[in-house]
């Protein structure tokens, strides 16, 4: 028997996203559905979320979503995925990874904390050289719910407190499109916005603050190293033998660059 939450996500992926059929949204999302991405909050299924989805489908008319991993405790669910498509205005191709953390109420989705690697997408569209997608999960819709593991959650919370999720410290955890580049922030402090476990798998959303290192080049405008900045990220990692042993993190590098490039607003 298919796990109920997984069955709902099958509809989310196949019936809604890959068919571009927003008429499915009222059947799988609550009217108050909220999407959290970077500093943005898209609140309200009909008045905000569906119009945003339509704009995405117009930009990439053949957009598709491939699932790479799903974990769930039955109440919350993490999905690592790639989106890919051809941009309508110039025909250029791109593929970009993402991780979403979903909540439901037993019948419909209530919220999603998600990050997608739009930095990589912009680079591919600018260069005309698309990336490649990871292999799909072999049987994502057969995923079974796993009980929470408080010990694994503690390990990850302690790991996050060190700032390890902001910048690669181990090859076991992959960042963004696998080409995370130089450090982005130093002297990091982190706020955990969402965290749950399903067996040894732990999913989280973090808002990190620190001093900008200069690692984004001209995209950050004239922002100097040392400028205070905020970076949002979502991760899905695996814990074993009391430590983080692998996983994937997607950071909002594009959002960080845009926030740094904005001219300072003088206080009145």
Image: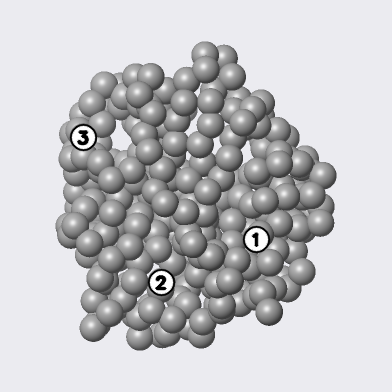
Could you tell me if residue 267 is visible in this image? no
Mark 2 — residue?
202
In the figure, residue 53 lies in which quadrant?
top right
Q: Nearer the viewer, residue 268 or 135?
A: 135
Callout 2 secondary element: strand
Q: Earlier in the sequence, mark 2 or mark 1?
A: 1
Q: Secondary structure at mark 1?
A: helix
Give the residue pinned by disc 1. Answer: 9
Rendered location of residue 255, percent (x, y): 42, 36
Circle 2 crowding by C-alpha within 10 Å: few under 14, some 14–19, many from 20: many
Residue 16: x, y in percent? 71, 47
- Percent across and percent down for residue 167 are 23, 51
Q: Are marks 3 and 2 in contact (CB under 8 Å)?
A: no
Q: Residue at x 48, y 83 (%)?
A: 148
Q: Secondary structure at mark 3?
A: loop
Q: Nearer the viewer, mark 3 or mark 1?
A: 1
Q: Quadrant of the N terminus?
A: bottom right
Using the numbered discs, state the Cα–Cα distance from disc 3 to disc 1 in whole angstroms.
Answer: 36 Å
Crowding at mark 3 (Cα within 10 Å: few <14, some 14-19, many 20+): some
On the image, numbered disc 3 is attached to which residue? 215
Mark 1 neighbour class, 10 Å CA radius: few under 14, some 14 to 19, many 20 or more: many
């Amino acid at each position: 028997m298919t796990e109920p939450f997984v069955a709902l996500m099958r509809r989310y992926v196949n019936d809604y996203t890959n068919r571009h059929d927003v008429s499915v949204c009222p059947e799988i999302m609550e009217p108050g559905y909220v999407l959290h991405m970077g500093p943005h909050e898209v609140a309200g299924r009909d008045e905000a979320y569906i119009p945003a989805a339509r704009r995405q489908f117009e930009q990439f008319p053949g957009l598709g979503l491939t699932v790479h991993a799903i974990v769930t405790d039955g109440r919350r669910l993490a999905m690592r995925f790639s989106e890919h498509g051809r941009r309508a205005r110039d025909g250029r191709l791109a593929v970009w990874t993402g991780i979403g953390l979903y909540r439901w109420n037993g019948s419909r989705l209530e919220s999603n904390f998600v990050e997608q690697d739009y930095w990589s997408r912009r680079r591919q569209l600018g260069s005309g050289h698309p990336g490649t997608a990871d292999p799909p999960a072999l049987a994502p819709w057969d995923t079974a719910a796993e009980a929470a593991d408080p010990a694994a959650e503690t390990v990850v919370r302690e790991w996050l407190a060190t700032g390890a999720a902001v910048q690669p410290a181990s090859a076991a955890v992959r960042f963004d499109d696998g080409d995370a580049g130089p450090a982005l922030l130093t002297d990091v402090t982190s706020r955990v916005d969402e965290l749950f476990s399903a067996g040894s798998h732990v999913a989280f959303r973090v808002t990190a603050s620190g001093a900008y290192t200069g690692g984004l080049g001209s995209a950050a405008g004239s922002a100097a190293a040392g400028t205070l900045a905020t970076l949002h990220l979502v991760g899905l990692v695996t814990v074993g033998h009391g430590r983080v042993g692998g996983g994937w993190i997607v950071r909002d590098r594009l959002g960080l660059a845009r926030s740094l490039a904005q001219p300072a607003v003088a206080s009145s």
